[in-house]
Amino acid sequence: MISETFPTIEMTDRAKVRLTYPHLPEFELKMDFNPIIERFHLVGNFCLVHWQAKPFGLRRWGVYDAGKDKYYPFSWNGAVCSTSPKFLQIDEELVKSVPTAVLFFTETTVIQAEYLTIANVR
């Protein structure tokens, strides 16, 4: 089943992710969270959640955990948030990388269990 296909995730540099699917050799999604991090002067432990617009049929949400420098994909019903986000967006005319809009969760980290949880850092 195509919806159960999971991507291969490679951290290529700090806050940079390369996402591919084994059965789609021509597809590659490169994400760079640095423009958003730099524009909004984000530091510390935080999570950035975005919607993966590609590939069609395999679209998911994704979360970048800055404290761990790790990226996690998840389905729309596969996450729980214990804190409220702020909405951040940068001008697509000025920055040509993706993502350009995220949900920002301050002082949080990702916990993997039955559901992926974006939780407060204690």
Image: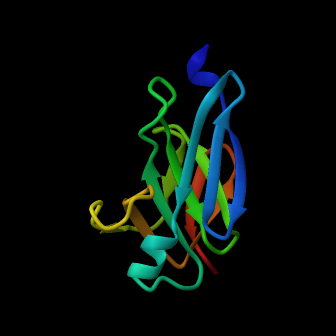
Name the colour scheme. Answer: rainbow
Residue 19 in which image quadrant: top right
The residue at 44%/58% (across/down) is 97
The residue at 33%/69% (across/down) is 88
Residue 6: percent from left, percent from top: 66, 32
Vertical comparison of 27 with 101: above or below:
above
89 displayed left or right of 25 = left
Vertical comparison of 90 with 10: above or below:
below
Residue 21: percent from left, percent from top: 66, 31
49 displayed left or right of 68 = left
Q: Nearer the viewer, residue 66 or 38?
A: 38
Q: Nearer the viewer, residue 44 or 13?
A: 13
Vertical comparison of 74 with 57: above or below:
below
Q: Split into 4 quadrants, where in the image is the C terminus?
A: bottom right
Residue 44: percent from left, percent from top: 58, 84
Vertical comparison of 63 with 75: above or below:
below
Residue 36: percent from left, percent from top: 43, 72
Residue 91 in which image quadrant: bottom left
120 displayed left or right of 49 = right
The residue at 44%/53% (across/down) is 50
Q: Nearer the viewer, residue 104 or 116?
A: 104
Q: Split into 4 quadrants, where in the image is the N terminus?
A: top right
Count up the numbered dots.
Answer: 0
Tell which residue pokes out farthest to the top in this image: 1
